[in-house]
Image (cartoon, grey):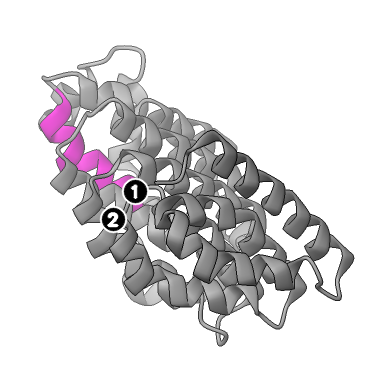
Amino acid sequence: MEEIEVFSTKLSSTGENVKLFLDDDYLEIPEEDIEDLEEMGYESYYTIEDSGQEVQRISVINNLPDLLKDTDSHDECMRRVVPKVREVLHVAQCEMQYAASAAFLQILQKNLVPIQNYTQTFLQTILNSVDGKDPEVSSAWLDTLLDVIELLPKDVIKKEILHVAIAKGQLSQSVAARMACCKILGKICTKFESFVIKKEILPVVQSLCQDVDYEVRGCMCNQLHSVARGLGLEATKSAILPELVELTKDEECSVRVHGLETVVNVLASLDSGRFY
């Protein structure tokens, strides 16, 4: 207990919340109980909790970047607070999820932990949270992932994210998962060389352009400009333009609109010399 008190007073504005956060038995959730909690519903579980605890937990999560920035509290925060945060997110309500998604992005933006540590902890939570049951929460985590991709090294993206994205793009996955795949691949294509995109990503992109669901086709269409930029001029002519032609003739009006908009963007990039 003395160890907790010493750590929690490092930042006076959040010290008491940190102490309560670490003392809170609610956060000790056995792995085998997670499914039971999901079945009974998050809301039912929270009815037995004091609303003040929710505010306290959100406060701690909001202040994670500050705790990690402080050299005196950094190591203890990584050892004690971060695991608790990751644990409670299994059953956290929306506001806590939103707070965590924003805090996790700030931690990377401010270089508060080494990339290896970030990859092993925060990135894994982000990837898992994208598959959440609440569409709005999943969307928030997806936005965080897209921002994180811009900041991560290529080797981390290829090792930790690319295979996850490709798996989401399979026809056996839900429409939401396939649409998430479209957005992730569009972002990834801005990071990799043309030969990597051709080998690893292009087949999935072409499949998603021909998906059975019009929302997926439209979503992938919106990302084709980024894919084309990554591929380069010649590959765009041979692989992307034929897909665009088909999308502009799609049976669904919204997909045709997306197709025409993408054609305009691609042609504008060609005129400005942005393809190499």
Kindly identify the amino acid type of the residue bearing the numbered disc 2.
Ile
Q: Is residue 48 visible?
A: no
Task: Tell me what residue is drawn at x 81 percent, y 73 percent.
Answer: 250
Quarter of the image for residue 39 reads: bottom right
Q: Is residue 52 left or right of residue 15?
A: right
Of residues 54 and 256, the one nearer the viewer is 256
Q: How many residues crowd mark 2 within 10 Å: few (<14), some (14–19), many (20+)? A: some
- Looking at the rendered structure, which numbered label has been put on residue 191? 1
In the image: residue 92, left or right of residue 77: right
Task: Judge by depth and name the residue closer to the eye, 6 or 91.
Answer: 91
Q: Position of residue 161 (x, y in %)?
A: 33, 61
Question: Label 1 near label 2: C-beta < 8 Å?
Answer: yes
The label on residue 157 is 2
The boundaries of the magenta stretch are: 73-86
For the point 30% across and 34% down, the residue is 108
- Give the CA distance from mark 2 to mark 1: 9 Å
Q: Give the image quarter of residue 219.
A: bottom right
Kindly report the secondary structure that dominates the magenta region of the rendered protein.
helix
